[in-house]
Image (cartoon, grey):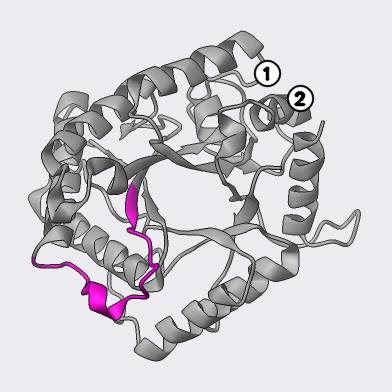
Amino acid sequence: MPQFGSHVSVAGGLHRGIERALEVGCDCLQVFTKNNNRWAAKPLEEAAVDAWRKAFQASDLKHPIAHASYLINLAAPDDKLFAKSVDALVDELQRATRLGLEGVVVHPGAYTTSCEADGLKRIVDGATEVLQRLAGPDAVDRAELPADAPGCRLLLENTAGQGSCLGHSVDHLAELVQQISSQVDGLGGRPAADQLGVCLDTCHAFAAGVDWNDPDALVAYRTRLQDELPVGSVRALHLNDSKKPLGSRVDRHEHIGRGAIGEAGFVRILTDEFFAEIPGYLETEKGVDEASGNDWDVVNLSVLRRLAAA
């Protein structure tokens, strides 16, 4: 059975995210390690890091990851915003490394007033700088970490292709991963594959034109990912249905099976030999399902497990 989890709140302390993940029945979890709509963040206190580590080690949870701030834009043509984004992403990865997380998911960026080619180059330059700094002057002291702490990867997330957002095609993802990898391989004694990866969002892919309900389209998409990305690049799935139709280029998440992808589409994703091996994280609306009285995460996780067993 695949590993399923959710993005959970850490209100009241990072360790509360672990408690909430366990309450709704997660196998894995995603968190924000800071306010996602602000640039500034207080440094992580050692007590908060210790509380997280102890709570995680006492749980059966696996594959903890974080999502970076939505303000970060590595494709920004504005030099000040670009530099601010690089600094913020370095901080995000430092925080995640201290917590022992496996990855930090970031939207590649939007080129805004420039062009696609310039935007992609900007992302390559920005991500390369981030990883170089983390292997050098901004490296987290490994002596401060548990002996079994994993290296934290930067995970580029595919997008819906809204506006000038980049990363909506396999071409984009492959170009970014290949070019960044060529510049960071071996940094800090780590191969590029241990520093960089991809997170795939089912809603974003659908909005960008991947028809999960067409078996041939799914196989074609999976084949391109396997052929054009380094082996093992896809480290996480964001499991979200879509409020908007196929190819809409609009990112609007819906509860599993209740959107345009539908249950049949998720059966194909969750039973595919490639996607079934990757941990999946819900990013669906929080709250309570009025019909059942259950927490929406409980409902969606139950649906995922039922569909995966179909």
| Residue 144 within the magenta-colored segment of the rendering | yes
Label 2: how many Cα within 10 Å (few below 14, some 14–19, many 20+): some
Span shown in magenta = 137-154
**Residue 94 in the image, given as x and y percentages of width and height:** 27, 67
x 15%, y 34%: residue: 182
Q: How far apart are marks 2 and 1 (CA)?
A: 7 Å
x 57%, y 12%: residue: 217
| Residue 200 within the magenta-colored segment of the rendering | no
x 80%, y 52%: residue: 299
Q: In this view, does 99 lie to the left or right of 183?
A: right
Indicate which disc residue 264 carries. Answer: 2
Disc 2, disc 1: CB below 8 Å? yes
**Residue 259 in the image, given as x and y percentages of width and height:** 71, 33
Q: How many marks?
A: 2
Residue at which label 1 appears: 213
Q: Is residue 113 visible?
A: no
**Residue 190 in the image, given as x and y percentages of width and height:** 21, 50
249, 261: nearer the viewer: 261
x 65%, y 57%: residue: 27
